[in-house]
Image (tube, rainbow, N blue to C red):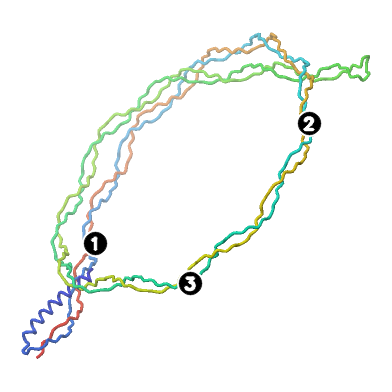
Amino acid sequence: MRSWIAVRLAAVALALRVAATASAWYPCCTTPCAPAVEYQTVTCYRPELRTEMREVQRTVYRCVPETHEQEIQETVLTQHWHEENRQYTVLVPTTRQENRQRTVVRCEYRQEQREATVLVPETRMVEQKYTVLVPEWREEKRQQQVMVPEMRTENRTRTYTVLETRYREEQRERTVVVPVMKTVQQQYTVLVPEVREEKRQQQVLVPEVRQENRQRTVTVCRTVPEQVVHQVTCYQPVTVAYCGGCGCGPCGVSYGCQMVPVTQNVTSTVFRTVPEQHVENYTVNVCSYRPENREYTVHVQTCRQETRTQQVQVCSYENRQERYTFRIAECVPVQKQENYTVQVCSYRPETREYTVRIPSTRQEVRTQQVAVCSTRQEKRHYTVQVPVQTQAVENYTVQVCEMRPETRSQRVRIAECRPETRTRKVQVTSYKTVAEVVREQVPVTTCVQVPYQVQVCVPVCCH
């Protein structure tokens, strides 16, 4: 963009110089003759913006922390313990035995003969006939007409249109923008920091501790023994007489041993947990807060506005008219012809002979052995065990638990909080503003006139 503007400025300067030269030379011509032309080298100047870094001195304000020790007093709660004897009542379990009666249902079994009719399956082989279809093939000759393709070459001519690009020159005018640099005085506003002390008040909550008596229900679990009766089945050997047919004794009676199940009641002691509740008094420390206003000093940092003045380079632009040559592209249609060769396909009919296989089936009778299942009724005898229930009254002993009150004493530790005033030193940090001079690099943009050489055409009068 800058080079383009510089070229336009050079063209304008050249036009002005050519006009001045012509006005200076033409009056001196004494004889009417054709003017001559010579080329001269002219030095022109174009504006160019350059940016460089300059060192600027500024004053910066920063906050510096200062730490010092300050002695403060505070009230803390100290916990103290003292022992105290207390009495409480507990329930002590007492166990005694008691005789009771209950009705027990006993189950006995007796054998019983029963008769049932069942179906017995029977299987026999039977000869059956069935018909199947047997496939057969026979060959047969047939004829069909097919189209056979034939290829031949044919020459053809075609006309086509081509667009050709042609250029023509045209003189036009356009408006260019020329930069102009000027110095302008501007004002800007900066913020200057300031620190001031300000006293404020805040409301704090001061803790206070007081003792309060309360009651609570305490659940104590104790272990109680309990007698439980449960039935246990065991096997005992019993001598049984049976007839073996071995010839021993008068009628061949033999004796053997058989295991018979016997149910017995077994008493065992089981321990179970019984919860007990009682009310006990206790003292708690209740903390409450009271509001208190306190005053403290804070550093408030503010900024004030300050107006300053500076010189600034402002670049403005001017519009100028110039003439230039522009090339316009035009597309012109042109007719052309060309010869080309194509392959033309034609078909001719032809009769051909082929053989096909035609399927057919015939029926055939075959024989097979088939298993046929049938059932017949048959009566059978079997023995079943029939349960018989009988009721009997039996005596048993249970453990009965009774609770009796008993007074006991214990020594407990009670905690209490006492207020105590303590003094300690804390680190307090305050801030102060310190001015500091710093140097920094600032970019500065200036407009510089750069020279360059241009050859111009100057008319010369003949003498």
Which residue corresponds to the image point at 15% horizontal and 69% vertical from the top-left?
321
Query: Mark 2 to mark 1: distance in Å?
Result: 122 Å
The numbered mark, 3 or 1, whose residue comes first in the sequence reads 3
Give the side of residue 387 with respect to residue 47, left or right.
right
Which residue corresponds to the image point at 31% horizontal and 36% vertical from the top-left?
73
Give the side of residue 463 with respect to residue 203, left or right.
left
For mark 2, give the secondary structure. strand
Pointer 3 residue: 153
The numbered mark, 2 or 1, whose residue comes first in the sequence reads 2
Of circles 2 and 1, which is in front? 2
For mark 1, give the secondary structure. strand
Pointer 1 residue: 439
Query: Mark 3 to mark 2: distance in Å?
Result: 87 Å
The amino acid type found where label 1 is placed reads Arg
Picture quadrant where residue 323 is located: bottom left
Pointer 2 residue: 123
Q: Residue 453: which numbered mark, if any?
A: none
Residue 186 pos. (x, y %): 14, 59
